[in-house]
Image: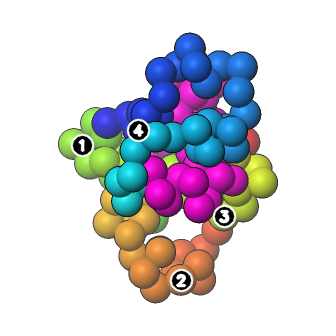
């Protein structure tokens, strides 16, 4: 499942993700999060676009080895949002645990560039 911007692609092509976040019109919890976290939202958009273009490919979970081929959802986790394409690939279970229990839960391997 791909996260989609509320704004159509043609409206965000020549716009920075930060500006895209400020132009969101909805008042949902998700759009309010996007407005409050423009750097995180920009990183999410960058990963989405890199996946769509083929510049970035999802990898198996770095903790358990599960993959989307196994029917498991794999998420991109950012340790540093200033490096939007440097991500760690985690299954939803391990990604949730990482956020709930903290950054030291799993050792950091070389993240994808």
Q: How far apart in space, not on screen, are marks 3 and 2 (Cα)? A: 11 Å
Residue 18 pos. (x, y %): 69, 44
Nearer-N-terminus badge (3/1):
1
In the rendered structure, does residue 77 fall within the stretch colored magenta? no
Nearer-N-terminus badge (3/2):
3
In the rendered structure, does residue 38 fall within the stretch colored magenta? yes
Labels 2 and 1 touching (C-beta < 8 A): no
Q: How far apart in space, not on screen, are marks 4 and 2 (Cα)? A: 24 Å
Range shown magenta: 31-60
Q: SS at mark 3? A: loop
Relative side of 70 to 101, left or right: left
Residue behind mark 2: 102
Q: Is residue 89 visible?
A: no
Towards the viewer: 9 or 70: 9
**Disc assigned to residue 45:** none
Residue behind mark 3: 79
Residue 64 pos. (x, y %): 38, 62
Mark 3 neighbour density, 10 Å: few (under 14) some (14–19) many (20 or more): some
Q: Nearer the viewer, mark 4 or mark 1?
A: 4
Relative side of 61 to 9, left or right: left
Q: SS at mark 4? A: loop
Q: Residue at x 21, y 42 (%)?
A: 71
Residue behind mark 4: 3
Q: In terms of image quadrants, where is residue 93?
A: bottom left
Q: In terms of image quadrants, where is residue 22?
A: top right
Q: How far apart in space, not on screen, are marks 3 and 1 (Cα)? A: 25 Å
Relative side of 9 to 43, left or right: left
Residue 87 pos. (x, y %): 62, 51
Residue behind mark 1: 70
């Amino acid at each position: 499942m791909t996260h989609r911007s509320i704004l159509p692609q043609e409206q965000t092509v020549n716009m920075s993700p930060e500006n895209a976040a400020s132009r969101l019109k909805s008042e949902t919890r998700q759009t309010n999060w996007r407005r409050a976290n423009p750097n995180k939202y920009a990183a999410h958009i960058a990963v989405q676009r890199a996946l769509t273009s083929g510049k970035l490919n999802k990898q198996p979970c770095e903790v358990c080895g599960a993959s989307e081929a196994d029917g498991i959802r794999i998420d991109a986790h950012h340790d540093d949002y200033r490096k939007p394409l440097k991500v760690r690939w985690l299954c939803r279970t391990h990604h949730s645990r990482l956020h709930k229990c903290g950054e030291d839960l799993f050792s950091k391997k070389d993240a994808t560039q």
